[in-house]
Image (cartoon, rainbow, N blue to C red):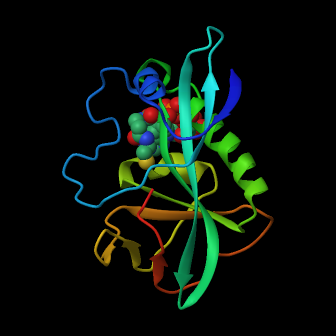
Amino acid sequence: MDVVEFGPMTDEYRHALEGDEFDPFDVAGVTLHFRAKERHVGLRDASGQLVASTGMVLTDVDVDGERFPVVGLGGVIVSATHRGRGLGRRVVEEALATAQRLGPRFAILFCHEDRAGLYRKLGFVEIPDDVWVQQPVGHAPMTQRTMWISLHGPSTWPPGEVIVRSLPF
Ligand SMILES: CC(C)(COP(=O)(O)OP(=O)(O)OC[C@H]1O[C@@H](n2cnc3c(N)ncnc32)[C@H](O)[C@@H]1OP(=O)(O)O)[C@@H](O)C(=O)NCCC(=O)NCCS
């Protein structure tokens, strides 16, 4: 597999990754507004087809009143025919390597509980405190799990209420 980096998700890439799959991210019924990711890391197979991708954004968070930047990961997907072969792990690891070069101390992501096992295996830890995310009007409680990982050596996510200063990703 070749690792590729690209900017925003395009219709062509989305089709390569999702095909005709209905609601791969299980967002039907989710009322929160999410934002597009500015950059992506993907995996291409030998024929050049994009088969896995992870999106990234930069944003600020306030934790217990203290503001700092984080890399937000989202849109992790492996095309349905390629799942279960380690590509989800690989594409997130490649995205974390890119995230390390972006500067912030931590990366965070949001996920449904039934996907959290993948991220726990990669070293992500759940934030137990309340998490609020920006919405078109005001802020709303995050209804999915929020998980963090240190990008630069041993650091621990600080305790306290989290306010994400952007739409979720
Ligand atoms: C979630 C997804 C990215 C996993 O990709 P994948 O290529 O099948 O995952 P991998 O084969 O790399 O799995 C890596 C490890 O995570 C585990 N894992 C994978 N999906 C998991 C899940 N949903 N729950 C718990 N563990 C999971 C695997 O068992 C494997 O464990 P191992 O290393 O001990 O063998 C893929 O199923 C997908 O694209 N789903 C649709 C989109 C989606 O739900 N994205 C996540 C949004 S939060």
- The N terminus lies in which quarter of the figure? top right
* The one of 38 and 99 positioned closer to us in this rendering: 38
Residue shown at 28%/36% (left/top)?
Answer: 23
Q: Residue furthest left?
A: 29
Q: Tell me if residue 156 comes above or below residue 94 in the rendering.
A: below
Count of labels in the image = 0
Give x and y (percent) for residue 80: 41, 23
Residue 73 is situated, as x and y percent measured from the top left of the image, at 55, 53
Give the percent coordinates (x, y) of residue 169.
45, 56
Left or right: 102, with 147 as reference point: right
**Which residue in the rendered view is the most extreme toward the top?**
47
> Quarter of the image holding residue 50?
top right
Residue plotted at (54% across, 45% down): 55
Name which quarter of the figure residue 57 lies in.
bottom right
User: Is 7 positioned to the left or the right of 82 in the image?
Assistant: right
Q: At 58% across and 50% down in the image, what residue appears?
A: 56
Q: Could you say where residue 113 lies in the image, as x and y percent from the top left?
A: 37, 55
The residue under the point 46% across, 52% down is 116
